[in-house]
């Protein structure tokens, strides 16, 4: 039971620490009526520490102290206990009702982050409306207990968490505008980006692998085709080489036969030799085509001067 209770208290105090910025040592406003319930044999200081699962700083207001003084000498022991606590100035010149004094000191928001240790049930129900105000009291068995967080406290906690979530979402939206440029597809949920890439990797990985396997299966068939093509290509190459050699011989023979401007034909021959050295499939075809074209050009240029004269005469003839 003790361990279970301690765990519960730790969890409850963690709520006050995280949501309401409570810090150790926890300031506990102890009311006069709670001190009156204290068992003289037990250590109230230790009991309070067990309730909040941390260091405590018990305090008592001036009005509560006055109420204890009024009890008289028979309750001097209670006054002595209270004197061990830090005195909280409440600025009530005339002592007022202790419960009302505590309400005034706590205020509407408990901005000083007090914990109230009080026995009056009416006071506790009133203080339950203030969010972020832990309350301690003696249960009927005489055990000091920390009340579960009030509805006001839980409501405030939910609201605070939503506000943080919205802030975080806005921050992540700004970040996402930058990451969208890089290439992230989804623009929605802000909490998933850590999980999404892993999922996408898992989804994306098998597809390319399967595609590669299919390609590997296709490669041998394609390789056979290539081999056939390569064989045909080699045959074509050999045929083309034969054709080219015949044509070159024919061209050279023609040029020799024509025997015109060896200086011009010289560099052309050098070019042909360079192109022959390259000897790629396309280069061979291109070389053949160029050779044919050059041969035709050579013939046309050789015949050009006569044609010009003939052309002019033809033109005159056409005009006539
Ligand atoms: Zn007071």
Image: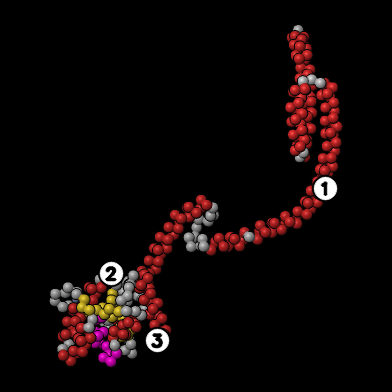
Disc 3, SS: helix
Residue appearing at x 55%, y 60% in the figure: 197
Estimate the spatial distance between the alpha carbons at disc 2 and disc 1, rounded to whole Å: 89 Å
- Whether tag 3 and tag 1 are in contact, CB under 8 A, the answer is no
Q: Quadrant of the N terminus?
A: bottom left
**Identity of the residue drawn at 32% across and 79% down:** 55
The quadrant of the picture showing ligand 1 is: bottom left
Residue 282 percent location from the top left of the image: 76, 38
Q: Secondary structure at mark 1?
A: helix
Relative to 240, residue 195 above or below? below
Decide: few, some or many residues near mark 2? Use Cα within 10 Å; few <14, some 14-19, many ≥20: few
Eye-nearest disc, 3 or 1: 1
Mark 3 = which residue? 2
Task: Residue under label 1, please give it.
Answer: 228
Q: Label 3 to label 2, Cα distance in Å?
A: 31 Å
Locate residue 199, reporting x and y percent: 58, 62
Q: Which mark is residue 111?
A: 2
Lower position in the chain sequence, tag 3 or tag 1: 3
Q: Is residue 188 magenta?
A: no
- The residue nearer to you, when weighing 239 against 185, is 239
Q: Which residues are magenta?
A: 30-42
Separation of disc 3 and disc 1 at Cα?
A: 87 Å
- Residue 14 — which label? none
Q: Return the residue found at the far top.
A: 320
Q: Left or right: 227 with respect to 30?
A: right
Q: Position of 8 compared to 202: left or right?
A: left
């Amino acid at each position: 039971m003790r361990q279970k209770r301690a765990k519960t208290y730790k969890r409850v105090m963690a709520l006050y620490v995280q949501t309401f910025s409570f810090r150790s040592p926890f300031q506990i406003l102890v009311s006069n009526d709670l001190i009156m319930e204290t068992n003289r044999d037990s250590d109230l200081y230790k009991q309070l520490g067990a309730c909040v699962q941390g260091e405590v700083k018990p305090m008592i207001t001036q009005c509560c102290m006055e109420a204890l003084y009024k009890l008289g000498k028979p309750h001097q022991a209670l006054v002595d206990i209270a004197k061990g606590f830090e005195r909280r100035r409440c600025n009530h010149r005339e002592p007022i009702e202790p419960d009302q004094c505590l309400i005034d000191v706590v205020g509407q928001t408990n901005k000083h982050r007090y914990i109230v240790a009080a026995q009056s049930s009416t006071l506790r129900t009133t203080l339950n409306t203030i969010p972020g105000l832990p309350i301690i009291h003696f249960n009927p068995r005489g055990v000091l207990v920390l009340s579960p967080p009030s509805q006001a406290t839980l409501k405030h906690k939910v609201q605070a968490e939503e506000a943080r979530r919205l802030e975080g979402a806005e921050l992540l939206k700004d970040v996402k505008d930058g990451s969208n440029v890089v290439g992230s597809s989804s623009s929605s949920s802000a909490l998933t980006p850590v999980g999404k890439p892993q999922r996408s990797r898992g989804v994306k990985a098998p597809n390319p692998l399967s595609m590669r396997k299919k390609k590997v299966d296709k490669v041998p068939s394609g390789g056979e085709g290539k081999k056939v093509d390569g064989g045909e290509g080699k045959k074509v190459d050999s045929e083309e080489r034969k054709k080219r050699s015949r044509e070159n011989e024919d061209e050279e023979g023609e040029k020799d036969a024509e025997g015109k401007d060896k200086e011009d034909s010289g560099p052309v021959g050098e070019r042909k030799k360079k192109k022959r050295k390259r000897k790629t499939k396309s280069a061979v075809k291109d070389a053949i085509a160029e050779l044919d074209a050059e041969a035709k050009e050579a013939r046309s240029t050789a015949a050009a001067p006569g044609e010009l004269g003939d052309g002019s005469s033809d033109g005159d003839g056409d005009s006539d």
